[in-house]
Amino acid sequence: MRARKPTEGDTGSGVPAPASEVPETPDVPEGTRAVLDGNEINRALTRIAHEVLERTKGGEHVTLLGIPSRGVPLAERLARRIEQVEDLSVPFGSLDITMYRDDLHLAPARALGKTEIPAGGLDDRTVVLVDDVLFSGRTVRAALDALGDLGRPRAVQLAVLVDRGHRELPIRADYVGKNLPTSLREGVTVLLSETDGQDAVLLGPAKARPSPALPSPATARKGHASRAVPPSYRDPRSNPASSPGTGTTADNAGSKEGDA
């Protein structure tokens, strides 16, 4: 049974929670510790809001797009912070990247998320992509590909709550809530009240990634055979009446297969 939602800095018993205490949540590996609590997340978002306003000269042409799933509530929170600071309503939405990922063949089927573009579109806007954790950079690359199919922004920037390093692509965040040095044996989990009932950033052992499903040897042999002998191929030896000029030779069949 899920514990009641605690207030910021409250353990549910009236005693303030230490920063290192791990909130109750399912699927947290043993040895996990909290590195950010709700108050620290709020302060990080407030700081990012000020930085966005400063770098975009008041934020008049800014649009925030959250990357599902936790980037979406973070984008909405950031829009609210900017409105509190500058009395400016910043449009925000969501950008689903599922079909642009480069690991679709390595992982189980993923559910499609929502892409919601604010009224007015993205052309000539400064689009700030918002995500919870920046790791290899592949999610952001997919977001850039998706964004290119939706409009032509004036500029694209990136805001993340946590940058844990280990980049595999030349991608850097413009706004970072916390730089968190990690090892590849560690995993970062972001909890948000909108999706998890509480706010926290946890650091613990990385969860094992499922290995990609490989075809069985029988399936592989069957697939190879079907490619090696296309339906249109006829062995000229089975039709002695065929002439060299009209019969299909094995060499020709092979060259056609290579072109396909």
Image (cartoon, rainbow, N blue to C red):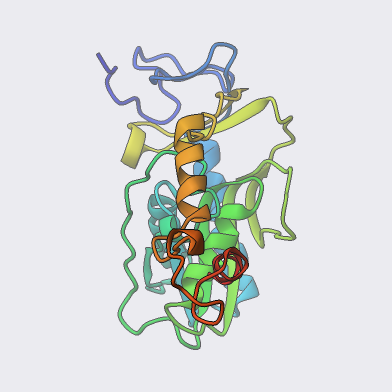
**217 up-or-down from 79: above or below:** above
**Above or below — where is 166 with respect to 157?**
above
Outermost residue on the front side: it is 241
Q: How many marks?
A: 0
Left or right position of 240 against 12: right
Q: Residue at x 60, y 12 (%)?
A: 31
Q: Is residue 107 above or below residue 153?
A: above
Residue 115, horizontal then vertical, whole percent: 34, 64
The residue shown at (36%, 29%) is 7
Is 214 placed left or right of 115 in the picture?
right
Q: Quick check: 142 above or below 24? A: below
Q: Quadrant of residue 110?
A: top left
Residue 24 horizontal/vertical position (percent): 40, 17
Q: Please identify the quadrant where the N terminus is shown.
A: top left
What residue do we see at 52% from left, 35% from top? 212
Pick the front one: 106 or 217? 217
Residue nearest the observer in this picture, 165 or 238 = 238
In this view, the residue in front, 237 or 161, is: 237
- The image position of residue 58, as x and y in percent, is 55, 78
Give the x, y percent position of residue 164: 68, 41
